[in-house]
Image: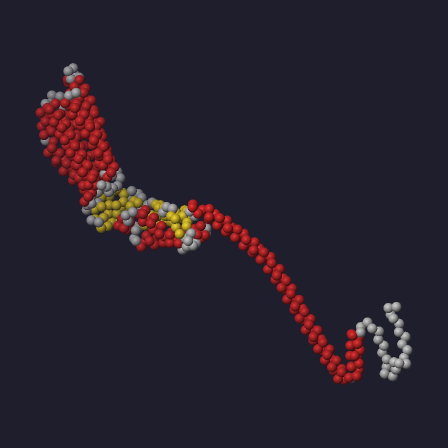
Amino acid sequence: MGRKEKTILITIVANIILIILRFFLADLSGSIGLKANAWHSFADVFVTSIVFIGLLISRYGASRFQTASKKLEHIVAIFVSIFIFDMGLEILSDALSGEVTELRYVPFVAAGAFLGVVINYFMARYKIYVGEQTGSQSMIADGYHSKMDMYCSIAVLVGIVGSLFGMPDLDKVAAIVAMVLLMISGYEIFTSNLRMLLHPEEEHSEEHHHHFHWNRKMVLYGSLVLCVAYLLSGVYFVQMDETGVVRRFGSVIRDDVSPGIHYRFPSPIEEVTLVKTGNVQKVETGTQELLTGDTNLVNVNLSVHYRIKDAGDFVLNMTDTNLLISSSATTSIRQIVGENTIDYVLTEGKEEIERSAFALLSDTMEKNKTGIEIVSVQLIRADPPASVMTSFQDLATARQDKSIYINEAIAYQNTIIPRANAEAYKKVAEAQAYREDKIQTATGDAELFTMRQSAYADSKDVTTFRLYMEAMDKILPNVQKLLLGNGISIDNAELWLKNPQK
C-alpha cells in the first residue's frame, strides 16, 4: 500500500472521530449546524472511501491502463463534487426547517466544535500535501473538500458562540453559510476536473495556479455569503394556526403578525416569536391526594383546556405554560376541595367544583396577564385513595343502610301519624259530645228546678207531696205502694196483699 492509500486510511479514521464527536455535540446542544456538519463528516467517510478505491484501482492498473487511471481519478473527484452538492442541499433543508431553539451546554459544545475545526484543518493540509507530492488530483480535491468542511465548522462554531450573546439565529445562519461554502467548493471541484477529463492536455501547473488563487476567492465569497445569509435570516414564516410577535431590542413592536411570509431585521436587532393561537391545548394536573373539609383524603385529577388569546402578553410574561397552568389548577382545586366534604366531592358536587375551578383559574390567568384564555375545566377523577378504599366501601354500605332505615321510619311515621290523628279527632269529638250532653242536662235540670221552685212557691203542700212521692218512687222502684188518706187508721185496716211473685 502506497503513501496515498495510507493517507486516505488515516483521514477515514479522523472522519469517524469527527462523526462521533459532532453527533454527540449536536444531540447535547440541539444545534442544527452541528447536526448538518456531522452528516457532512459522515458523507466524507463514504466519499473518501470512493477515493481510496479509485486510488487502489489506479495503482494496480497503472502499468497497463495509465490513461484510464488518470481519468478514473478525475471521475472520482467529480463524484466528490456531487456529494458536496448533495450535502449542501441537506444543510439548507435543516437550516430552513424548524424554529430557532435555545442551545444547551454552549461552552462545552464550543470547545468540542473548536476541536473539530483543528482536526479538519490538519486533515485538509495533510491530504493536499500528499496529493501534491504524489500528483493525485482526487486526493487534492478531497483535501479541499476537507478544507471546506473546516470553513463550515468555523461557521458552526461562530453560530454556537453567538448564542452566548443573545443571537440564537446565528446557528441557522451558520448552517446556511456552510451550505453555500460547500456549493462553491463543489462547483470548483466539478468544473476543474471536468475540464481536465475533457482536455487532458492541460498541465498540472495550471491546476496549481488555480488552487493558489483559491484562498483569496474564498475570502471574498465567504464575506459575501455571510452578508447575504445575515440579511436572509430575517425572513420568517407564520403558519395558519400561528401569530407572530416581533420584538425590537426586547420591546414588542407588533403582536398580531398574520400567517404568511414576512421579514424582520436580523438578530439581534429584532426577534420574532411564533405563538400557536389557533389551537386549543390541554394540561392535566395529574393525580393529587387532597384533604377535604371534613379531614378525608381524596384523589383528584383536573384537566384544563386553554388557548392563547393575547400573543404579546404571552411572549412577555410566560416561560413555562404547562407548569403555570398545572400549578394554578392544583392550587384552585386544593382550595375548593378543602372547603367541601368528601360526600359532596364524590357525589353531587362535580359540576359545581368544575365551575369554581374555572372561575379561579381564569381569574389567575387574567391577573397575571398571561395572555391565556381558559376554555374549560374538567374533573376527570375524584375517588378515595386505594389504601382506604375498603373503609370507604364499608362507609358507603353504612350510608345505604342508613337511607333504608330512614325510609322505613318515614313510612312508619306516615302510617302511625294519620292513625293517631284519627284517634285524637275521635276523642275530641267524643269529649265535645259529652260536654254538650252535660251542658244540656245541667241546663234541663236547672230549668226543671226553676219550674219546681215556681210550683212550690204557688202550692207548697201539693208540691211537697209530689216531690215526696217521686223520691219514694225512685228509692223504692219495685215495691208495691198503697196510698191511704189521712182519715184511715192503719190499725183497723185490712189489707189484702198478694205476693206478685207467688
Quadrant that contains the N terminus:
top left
Q: How many marks?
A: 0
Residue farthest top in this picture: 64
Q: Is residue 7 above or below residue 96?
A: above
Percent from the top left, x then y, of residue 499?
A: 87, 71
Q: Is residue 32 visible?
A: no
Q: Residue at x 24, y 35 (%)?
A: 24
Q: Where on the picture, by quarter, is residue 44? A: top left
Percent from the top left, x then y, of residue 488?
A: 88, 82
Q: Is residue 339 above or below residue 159?
A: below
Position of residue 425 in the picture relative to residue 116 (left or right): right
Q: Residue at x 19, y 29 (%)?
A: 14
Quadrant that contains the C terminus:
bottom right
Percent from the top left, x then y, of residue 193?
A: 15, 25
Percent from the top left, x then y, of residue 154?
A: 16, 36
Q: Is residue 297 visible?
A: yes
Residue farthest front in this picture: 491
Q: Residue at x 20, y 32 (%)?
A: 18
Q: Residue at x 11, y 21 (%)?
A: 201
Way the structure is coloured: secondary structure
Position of residue 225 in the picture relative to residue 423 (left or right): left
Q: Foreground: 392 or 356?
A: 392
Q: Foreground: 67 or 199?
A: 67
Q: Is residue 136 above or below residue 437?
A: above
Q: Foreground: 71 or 37?
A: 37
Q: Foreground: 34 or 473?
A: 473
